[in-house]
Image (cartoon, helix red, strand yellow):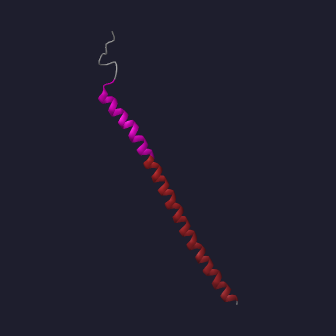
Amino acid sequence: MLTCSTGAWPSPESKKKSSTSNTRSWPMTNLFVAYTLAFIIIFIFTWLLISRQSRLEKKLDELKQRLKEKS
């Protein structure tokens, strides 16, 4: 007949703690990192578009002024 000593298998409490912390925290951490990176990328992209738009508007105004001066 097989007998189980206390050191043969981990206790259900320690097994539950390790599986909960390993299984649930990593996907949530990865998900948080993924959403954070997506937000940062979208924010930087939007910021670059707005700054480019303002530079192009300044250039357009300068070209309009030059055309007015020449005519």
Q: Residue at x 51, y 61 (%)?
A: 44
Q: Is residue 44 left or right of residue 1?
A: right
Please tell me which residue lies in front, 5 or 45. 5
Q: How many marks?
A: 0
Name which quarter of the figure residue 10 lies in.
top left
Please tell me which residue lies in front, 1 or 15. 1
Q: Main secondary structure of the magenta part?
A: helix
Residue 58 position, x and y percent, is 58, 77
**Up-down relation of residue 9 to residue 37 (above or below):** above
Q: Is residue 17 left or right of residue 41?
A: left
Q: Residue at x 41, y 45 (%)?
A: 28
Q: Residue at x 47, y 57 (%)?
A: 39
Q: Which residue is the extreme one toward the bottom?
A: 71
Name which quarter of the figure residue 7 lies in.
top left
Name which quarter of the figure residue 18 lies in.
top left
Please tell me which residue lies in front, 12 or 7. 12
Residue 43 position, x and y percent, is 49, 61
Image quadrant where one finds the C terminus: bottom right
Range of the magenta residues?
10-30
Q: Residue at x 51, y 59 (%)?
A: 42
Q: Is residue 26 left or right of residue 46?
A: left
Please tell me which residue lies in front, 26 or 45. 26
Image quadrant where one finds the N terminus: top left
Residue 9 position, x and y percent, is 34, 21
**Up-down relation of residue 70 to residue 47 (above or below):** below
Judge whether residue 18 is colored magenta.
yes
Q: Which residue is the extreme one toward the right?
A: 71
Q: Which residue is the extreme one toward the front?
A: 1
**Up-down relation of residue 61 to residue 25 (above or below):** below
**Up-down relation of residue 66 to residue 29 (above or below):** below
